[in-house]
Image: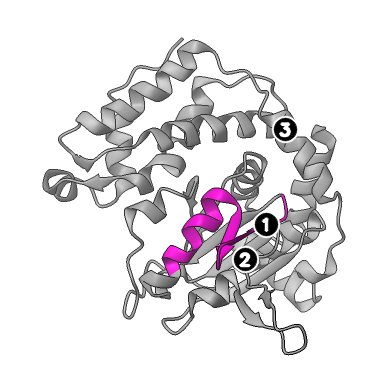
Amino acid sequence: MNEKINALIENIERVIVGKREVIVKVVSAMLCGGHILIEDVPGVGKTQLVSALAKSVNGRYNRIQLTPDIMPSDIVGFSMVDQHTHELVYKEGAAMCNFLLADEINRASPKSQSSLLEVMEEHQISIDGTTYKLPEPFMTLATQNPVETYGTYHLPEAQMDRFIMKISIGYPDPAQELEIVSHAEAGMNAAKIEAVMDTADVMALTEAAGKIYVAPQVRQYVVSIVNATRNSPLIRLGVSPRGSIALIKAAKAFAFTLGRDYVTPDDVRYLAKDCLAHRLILSPKGKSQFPTNEAALEAVLMTVAAPQ
């Protein structure tokens, strides 16, 4: 199984240079049925990453550029009357795919943002009393620009809680950027790579990742971390049980991606900020002491003893 995962990661690395950690996290999220929020500045490869992932597993890929005038029907589809049969016919929206890139999700209106909730949680679309199942696997990868906030709508906590991780790609170092420029000159992009597996392989790998062993002490460690966020004076709104479940699922998929059949406390700690920080609301004390949710969560993690 892990030969396939390595092949997948290496295939994506042909397009996304020097970001193996980010790729491993995205693949881990896919293998536990999760969705990812990528918060980063423009031009660092967010769209290419999603496109390369979809192409590598031969999945159906849709991209929707979210703006204030995008309607929920653009995302989930709509019903219309067929002129010949006079019956309602469903017209697919962007979400009817395996990999949905929701670009600049914070520019969509709250009404359009909320239309993604059922899609992300239930993997289905309900319109006019009829439910349409999405193809499996289904993964939403949303992006937002943390710098330019004019004309944006803050994602509500219920929406943020649906993302298993929030990650950042970051700028490449000079050597990596030189390689990226060379690739661009040679016309190397996600459209040029071939599939190394199909969606049936992804589902088989997902099932295998779900069977990774989590020791009771490691499970208790996750619960202790989450409870610490609820009781910290730095945090006004702590992590919900959905966050505990998400961290365990992500840690299992991450361990599987690395070729292990068990989760370690280090896996939990490594993924904690990616899986939990975006679910927090800091208290005034937390905001005054720490610039980001991640920094405040790091302080909370220091207070929780890891099992030996």
Q: Position of residue 247 (x, y in %)?
A: 48, 33
Q: Position of residue 53 (x, y in %)?
A: 72, 57
Image quarter where the N terminus lies is top right
Q: Position of residue 38 (x, y in %)?
A: 50, 58
Determine whether the residue tagged by mark 2 lies in a helix, strand or loop.
loop
Labels 1 and 3: the sequence-earlier one: 1
Instruction: Count neighbours of disc 2 (C-alpha within 10 A) and say few if under 14, some if 14 to 19, many if 20 or more.
Output: many
Alpha carbon separation for disc pair 1 and 3: 18 Å
69 to 100, vertically: above or below: below
Q: Residue at x 48, y 50 (%)?
A: 163
Can you see residue 244? yes
The range drawn in magenta is 113-136
- 225 left or right of 11 in image: left
**Residue 3, picture quadrant:** top right
Alpha carbon separation for disc pair 2 and 3: 23 Å
Residue type pointed to by label 3: Glu
Can you see residue 258? no
Residue at which label 2 appears: 95
Determine whether the residue tagged by mark 1 lies in a helix, strand or loop.
loop
- 76 left or right of 8 in image: left
Residue type pointed to by label 2: Ala
Determine whether the residue tagged by mark 3 lies in a helix, strand or loop.
helix
Residue at which label 3 appears: 207
> Number of marks in the image?
3
What residue occupies the far bottom of the structure in this picture? 83
Asked if the residues shown at circle 1 and circle 2 are in contact, with their CB atoms under 8 angstroms apart, the answer is yes
Residue type pointed to by label 1: Leu
Q: Residue at x 48, y 81 (%)?
A: 70
Q: Which mark is residue 134?
A: 1
**Residue 250, picture quadrant:** top right
Q: Which is closer to the viewer, label 1 or label 3?
A: 1
